[in-house]
Image (cartoon, rainbow, N blue to C red):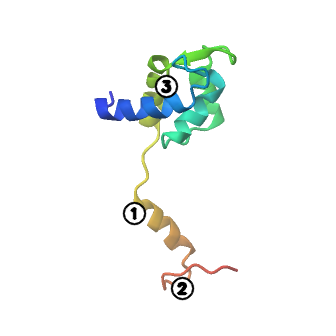
Amino acid sequence: MFRLDVQIEFQEAFSIFDQKGDGKIQVSQIGEVLRALGQNPTESEVKKLSHQHRPDERISFEVFLPIMQTISRQRPVDTADDFIEGLRHFDKDGNGYISSA
């Protein structure tokens, strides 16, 4: 379970996607909201987690939160060190620069 302050942050982001002001988002927006919250689910993952809802259905934050929890548990969070290590792969000369060609 997420800490209360984190849930509040998620709720604020969720509300940005609430176009009708009724506390709900379209099921088709689940992937967008997850990505806005720093997750990177595949379309397949989003479909798998939202399959019990009709595409035109609107869901509340209370329904969305368990989806967010499932996605966040499935994907490890990359660190800055992971990013730097990935860049080192392209630094062929080992001088801290990546060739543009």
State yes or no: discs 3 and 2 in contact (Cβ < 8 Å).
no
Mark 2 nearby-residue class (10 Å; few <14, some 14–19, many ≥20): few
Residue 93's disc number: 2
For the residue pair 23 and 39, the one nearer the viewer reads as 23
Q: Can residue 3 be seen in this snapshot?
A: no
Does residue 39 appear to the left or right of 80 in the view shown? right
Residue receiving disc 3: 67
Q: Position of residue 17 (x, y in %)?
A: 57, 30
Query: Is tag 1's residue or tag 2's residue first in the polypeptide sequence?
Result: 1
Mark 3 nearby-residue class (10 Å; few <14, some 14–19, many ≥20): some
Rounded to the nearest angstrom, the CA distance separating label 3 from label 1 is 28 Å
- In the image, which is nearer the foreground, mark 3 or mark 2? 3
* Helix, strand or loop under label 3: helix
**In the image, residue 29 above or below residue 84:** above
Q: Position of residue 20 (x, y in %)?
A: 61, 20
**In the image, residue 26 above or below residue 90:** above
Does residue 10 appear to the left or right of 53 in the view shown? left
Mark 1 nearby-residue class (10 Å; few <14, some 14–19, many ≥20): few
For the residue pair 49 and 65, the one nearer the viewer reads as 65
Q: Kindly identify the residue that appears in the image at 43 percent across and 52 percent down.
A: 78
Q: Amino acid under label 2? A: Asp
Q: Kindly identify the residue that appears in the image at 60 percent across and 24 percent down.
A: 48
Query: Is tag 3's residue or tag 1's residue first in the polypeptide sequence?
Result: 3
For the C terminus, which image quadrant?
A: bottom right
Residue 70's disc number: none
**In the image, residue 87 above or below residue 92:** above
Q: Kindly identify the residue that appears in the image at 50 percent across and 41 percent down.
A: 39
Q: Amino acid under label 1? A: Asp
Residue receiving disc 1: 81
